[in-house]
Amino acid sequence: MKFNPATALEKTHHLGSYNGVNQSINDSATFAFESGEAMTACFNGQLEGAFLYSRHWNPTNLALSQALAAMENSESAWVTGSGMAAITNTILELCESGDHLIASRTIYGGTFAFLKNYVKRYHIEVSFVDTTNLDEVAKSIRPNTKLIYTETMNNPMLQIADIPQLAVIAKKHKIKLVVDNTFTPMIFSPIELGADIVVYSMTKFVNGKNDTTAGAICACKEFINSLIDLNHGSSMLLGGVLDSYRASNIHKNLYTLAIRMKQHSANAMYLAEKFQTIGIKAIYPGLPSHPNYKTMQETMNPEFGFGGMIAIDLETTERASRFMTLMQEQHVGYLAVSLGYFKTLFSNSGKSTSSEVPEDEQKKMGLSEGLVRFSVGLDHEIERTFELIEKCYRAV
Ligand code: PLP
């Protein structure tokens, strides 16, 4: 039977202490040992299941990680204090000085800035390519290439990476395929499709409440253990761990993710189709006019829909700005970055979440200065939301 992330998650158990129906929050940074010998054994990695210090593991983070691993069908997972911690820890764990990696040109601005400006301090080279162009990816591989990095649905152009085909290239060259699945939890199961490592900004859909930043790394046990190795691990030594209070909240929110994704997707599809009928050109991968519609159809878990993200082009920054201000005044949602919230959020990508990407690179990725990206909320009456958006659009 085909893997289903929602069913896999449902099968996890999360009783806390005293049989509380939610996992208990373990409110300790450090853990006591019964003897000096036990402490020594634990630090030597010989005490299976023992906790030594919260930056390494704590029971609350472990419970959330196990649920995430079930949802992704990965052997293991580890949770971080932000999506950027998940991404940077993963890349620094896989690459060392003199290595090379291939990254999608169209990615979240913070990831782009890290790869463009930061890793060169460590003499790691990056080739930015269009990861939907498989030839370009294959041709960019060098003897020192360690990984291919892509977003499943990318930011902000909403292109869809062909994960099975990228996995074929990665496997052929014995390199890792790292996928940021932040826009499409449940909708895509990248490990099932052949990816090696999945990273998340759980700040977005996974948590869905916009009350914290958090991230996750889902991968095989060997990789997760290397990340938290006491002497060499990027996560252990850079210290990007998630706080257990936040882990507990996210864990509870995870169990409504499947129904939230369906509703985000249904609302976004409604808006995308309506935009089309009134002549607004919408970028939405659920429309047959989208260049990667077929790839998405062939690789997605269809019951969760085509996702909650839509972009429309207002052509100029000024017009985009007037449109967004008006939408906020009319209570369509909030003029704010981020996504996956229960309210609709909108932002002008080129001047916000992709502002780290220089203008010439923005042009190469086809990003217009007037592009407004919507993270469509869980609105109960999406027909009403559409009417408000249309009114604002016509007014500018
Ligand atoms: N990946 C994607 C696709 C994002 O949109 C973002 C944030 O906006 C990140 C990663 C970074 O996550 P965080 O803000 O939780 O560090």
Image (cartoon, helix red, strand yellow):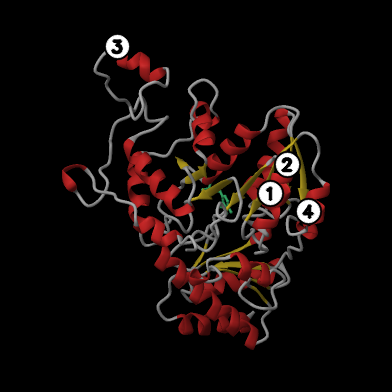
- Which is nearer the N-term, disc 3 or disc 4? 3
Q: Secondary structure at mark 1?
A: loop
Viewer can see residue 212? no
- Which is nearer the N-term, disc 3 or disc 1? 3
Are circles 3 and 4 on residues that touch, CB within 8 Å? no
Are circles 3 and 2 on residues that touch, CB within 8 Å? no
Q: Given the image, on which type of amino acid does mark 1 rest?
A: Glu
Where does the C terminus fall, quadrant-wise?
bottom right
Q: Can you name the residue that lies furthest to the front here?
A: 1
Q: Residues within 10 Å of mark 3 (few under 14, many from 20)?
A: few
Q: CA distance from mark 3 to mark 4?
A: 57 Å
The residue singled out by tag 2 in the image is: 116
Figure check: 355 above or below 113? below
The residue singled out by tag 3 in the image is: 36
Q: Secondary structure at mark 4?
A: helix
Q: Residues within 10 Å of mark 1 (few under 14, many from 20)?
A: many
Task: Judge left or right: residue 263 versus residue 288.
Answer: left
Query: Splitting the image into 4 quarters, where does residue 196 fall?
Result: top right
Figure check: 330 above or below 179? below
Instruction: Single out the mark in the foreground, 3 or 2.
Output: 3
The structure residue drawn at horizontal position 48% and vertical position 61%, both measured from the top left corner, is 340
Q: Secondary structure at mark 3?
A: helix
Q: Position of residue 91 (x, y in %)?
A: 63, 37
Q: Secondary structure at mark 2?
A: helix
Q: Given the image, on which type of amino acid does mark 3 rest?
A: Gly
The residue singled out by tag 1 in the image is: 356
Instruction: Single out the mark in the foreground, 2 or 1.
Output: 2
Find residue 361 and name its label: 4
